[in-house]
Amino acid sequence: MRIRIVGAGAMGRGIAQWAAEAGHTVELCDAREGAAGQAVEFIEGMLDRAATKQRITARTAQAALERIHPSDTPTAPADDLDLVIEAIVEDHDAKLTLFRELEECLPARTLLATNTSSLSVTRIAAGLKDPSRLAGLHFFNPAPLMKIVEVIPGALTRPDIPRTLVKLVKASGHSAVIVADTPGFLINHVGRGLATEALALLEESVADVEDIDRIAKDVLGLRMGPFELMDLTGLDVTAAVTDSVWQGFRHSERLRPSYLTASRVAAGLHGRKTGRGFYSYADGKASVGPELPIDGDADRPAYVPGEGPEADALREALCRSGVRLAATPRAKTAPLIFIPTWGTTVADAVGSGGFPADRTMGVDPLSLTTSRRVLAITPATAPQAARDGRAVLARAGDAAEPYAVSVIRDAPGSVAQRLLSSIISVAATLAERSIATPNDIDVAVKAGLGYPQGPLLWGQQVGAWRLLALQRALYRTTGDPRYRPTRWVTERAQLGLPLTQPAADPHHINA
């Protein structure tokens, strides 16, 4: 295939490298004199590096480089061009002007694709004489390594074009998912779940930046904590995308931005690129504060009230660590009382169960099978009880290393539960609206955001009923509509179906 890529910046040159390595002939074009040639030099360096690391052979690298032809004329006529991928500035008018010029100089058979990450494909296409030939083809940076591409048909895109683009992408070594033309498309939309909930937790002072990131990585298994990720992406970029998606979905409560971002962006606290964001950076490394020392009584007994899977799991985990379990909360040994909260609060348990407030604390059940345990304290928790509780939870029994323990403020759902519920809920709303299929959501999010599982499969592993109980408890406890249980999770729990089960299709009844 002969592909023209317009725009020789980071995205354009990355797409050019991907296409050339896949065996396509590439015209890399940029109206800025010499920009395309400089981009080819950059690509040569990247190919040489890949060959040095033995990801590809030197011969493959040279062959790919020879397929790339730089040009300063993006709108040059061509009869043999199969596809144009636009990767210029993220501005509607600039993209429309370019496509209008391309429409005039290229034959009708040449497909047109925009790499926009946030603009409406339908709106760009509407300005063309033939809007049916344009679709979205959204790569992620760096394009050669981020092996996922969103294919976005506009309202008037010919039905054959998305299928053709998916076939092209898959044959060229990447995964492709078809996504409806909606604000944020798929991956950027689902990414709001983690970012907005992390900021909400920070707003409420549930935990500091470092502990939220530690819990996200150690308990949920994320590669980067949400604040590390925002610093890497740039808070200015994160805030703009979040506002765009929120506004595009008519101020959906589930996507509600934080008041914290605007002031931080105005102050220039954008992250790594400015040297300071949620963390301070020196030589590209974040300055992270130390964890609290373990200085309590690890031999103090504990009591876990109640029945059910969360309480049973907590008692079993404590027993494995060699913790002495008391028979009653009011034993003479004054045991620590650990509440396995699931969408609820320690304060609610104290109020309804009559437990001594000064030594009653919460433990997140999600943390019990990980290297980090999470302890929630209330304003009534005695400081010594909190120190002892941290020491008791750090006990590892016969294991070589003690558990890490994060101490947070008592809040509905703790940290990990709220982050996970938000990620799954936002993904579920995409499935509800048929923005993408459940399988495409999971494939795209795992590849694009680096989550350990696709969000719907992740929720299935938690359990549909258990997840629904979490969502209902969060909504009941907070009264905040952002935590309203999703129809997708509710329906599948009630029907006994996996969260990955596609929606019913009335058109297929007679198939």
Image: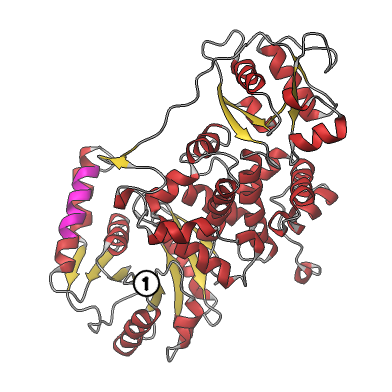
Q: Which residue is mark 1?
A: 90
How far across and how far down the image is residue 331, in percent? 83, 11
Rendering coords of residue 344 (x, y %): 76, 40
In depth, the one of 29 and 322 nearer the eye is 322
Query: Horizontal placement of 480 versus 23: left or right?
Result: right
Q: Residue at x 40, y 79 (%)?
A: 92
In the rendered image, which quarter is residue 51 located in? top left
* Quadrant where the image shows the N terminus: bottom left
Q: Nearer the viewer, residue 58 or 390?
A: 390
Query: Do we see residue 180 in this rendering?
Result: no
Which kind of residue does numbered mark 1 sit on?
Glu
Q: Would residue 47 be seen by someone viewing this image from the given angle?
A: yes
Q: Quadrant of the C terminus?
A: bottom right
Q: Which residues are magenta?
A: 40-50
Q: Main secondary structure of the magenta part?
A: helix
> Circle 1 — which element?
loop
* Depicted 462 relative to depicted 113: above or below: above
User: How many numbered discs sit on the rendered protein?
Assistant: 1
In the image, residue 267 above or below residue 372:
below
Q: How far across and how far down the image is residue 62, in percent?
A: 17, 51
Residue 287 lies in the magenta-colored region? no
